[in-house]
Every structure is written in C-alpha cells, then in structure tokens.
Amino acid sequence: CWCWEAQLRTAVGDIGRWTRLRNRDHHRAAAANPLSCNYSRQRADCLRCLNKSIGSVQPGACDFMSTKRKTPDAPRAIKAGDPVRREPRAEKTDEAAVPEFAALDAAAEGRVEYRKVRVPAHRYTPLRKAWPQIVTPLVEQLKLQVRFNPRSRCVELRSAPTTPDAGAVQKGADFVAAFALGFEVADALALLRLEDLFVDSFEVKDVKILRGDHLSRAVGRIAGADGKTRHAIENATRTRVVVAGTHVHVLGSAQNIKVARDAICDLIIGAPPGKVYNRMRTVAKRLHSRL
C-alpha cells in the first residue's frame, strides 16, 4: 500500500543522510590530523584524505573513495549525424616491409627432392640420341642425380647434397618435360637459363570442335607449307611452337605465348593467313618498341 511505500522511502532517505554525515565527519577528522584516518595506512589512492599542510605524512586513502570512483561510460550507438573518427595512419618508413632471405639449398631444407618425367614412345629414340646433351647441364649446372629407367621409360631426377638450389629439381624436370613434348635441346635449355619462360599446351579441339578432314586442314593451316606459317609465328612472337598431332605446345614468356596462341586460334577458326600475318606483324612491332 502507499503507507508501506512512504515508510520505505523515508527509511532509505535516512540511511543516505546518515552515510553522508559519517563520511563528512571522517574526512574532516582526516584533514585535521592525517594520522587519525584509519584507512590511510591501507591504501594510497584517496586524495581527499591528504593534508597539504603536512608534507611528511603520506597521502591516505579510504574505501569510500574506491567505491565512489567513476566508471567509464558504456559505448554509445553511432548516429547518422555523428562525425567520423579517423585513426591516425602509421608513418611510412624506408625499411622494406617484406623481409628478404637467401635461397635455401637442398641440403639445408632437410629432404631429398625427387621427380619422374615419362617419355612418350615417339620420343624414346631422340632421347637416346640426345642423352649426353640432356644429362650434361643437369649434372654440371644444377648438380642433380639423373638416370633413365628403361622399364618404366621415365627420366628420374633427384637432388644431391651438393645441389645449390632447392628448386633445381623442378627446373630439371621442366627441361626434360619440354624435350619430351618435342622441343629441341637448345630451345629447352632456355628453361634452365631464364626464369620467366613457360610451356603452354592445348589441343585443336579445345578451340573449335572439328572432325575428319576439317581437323586435318586446321592442323595444316597452323603448320603451313613446309612449316612457313609456324616459323613466321615463332619469329614474330619470339616463341617456339611444336605441332604434335592435334596438340600444340608453345614455349616462351607469358606475354609472347598469349600473342602466339591468339594467332594460332585465328588459324584454327578459319581466318585468312594474310590477315593473321598482318596482325602478328603489328603486334611484333609493338613488342619490339617496348623492349
């Protein structure tokens, strides 16, 4: 009832009034004599118990101040009109952000790298004839262990303790794989000397679905009479092209491979060779001017 609420409100007011009087008397006594503060010897974070006139007495503290500390406000929701706070950007330094480390050799890596490259049947005889030219750069330059397994007809490469670079095994495997695709040894050696060379392979049917004589004519348009078209593409784009059946392999840099692939795709679709030559000539001049 209302009588009970009035009595409760009166009791709460009396308790608050009594608490304020007690704290006031306590701090008055502490100001008069700092040593009379019973709480001054316990904590040292109450500035109200400090008597500034006595410098030798350490500032005292009481539990009253610790309970009356202001708590941080809760985060307020962002409104549409509030200004946007921007964090200060870190100052740029001259030091490189990415650390640089020396190349890791195969021995320091702690494991033996192993690769196996399968040789097709039609490249078995050329591999046997050019075996000395293939093994010499792998052993002398890359310091790899190489052997040919006649049962599986695979060239096996393995890193040795003297291998200077951990990626030498992969370079050697790419070199052997390029020779297995049909490239000459001198052209495949460029994969060992240069870093930005790749081999791109695709099939004629990937560009346009052809069958029978139409497929044969498309392959003939890529090669040309006595290989003239293929040589023209190689000289204009600075690449090497191998036509093996219905598969086309292009060796060169990424930009040159794209130009050669576009020209070959135009020939497969049926574009006139003269138009393809003019387009390649324009692109070749542009590439030469950049270099």
Image (cartoon, rainbow, N blue to C red):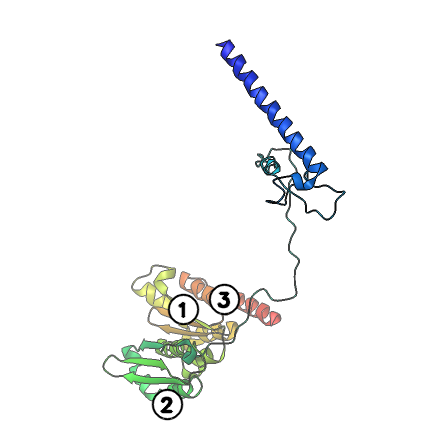
> Is the residue 184 above or below the residue 31 in the image?
below
Amino acid at pointer 3: Val
Q: Nearer the viewer, residue 143 or 192?
A: 143
Gap in Å between the C-alphas at discs 3 and 1?
A: 17 Å
Front label number (2 vs 3)? 2
Q: 175 left or right of 24? A: left
Amino acid at pointer 2: Pro
Determine the image quadrant of residue 41. top right
Q: Residue furthest right?
A: 53
Q: Tell me which numbered mark, 2 or 3, is placed earlier along the sequence.
A: 2
On residue 221, which mark appears?
Answer: 1
On residue 259, which mark appears?
Answer: 3
Q: 140 left or right of 67? A: left
On residue 132, which mark appears?
Answer: 2
> Is the residue 66 above or below the residue 270 in the image?
above
Amino acid at pointer 1: Arg
Mark 1 secondary-structure assignment:
helix
The answer to whether mark 2 and mark 3 are in CB contact below 8 A is: no
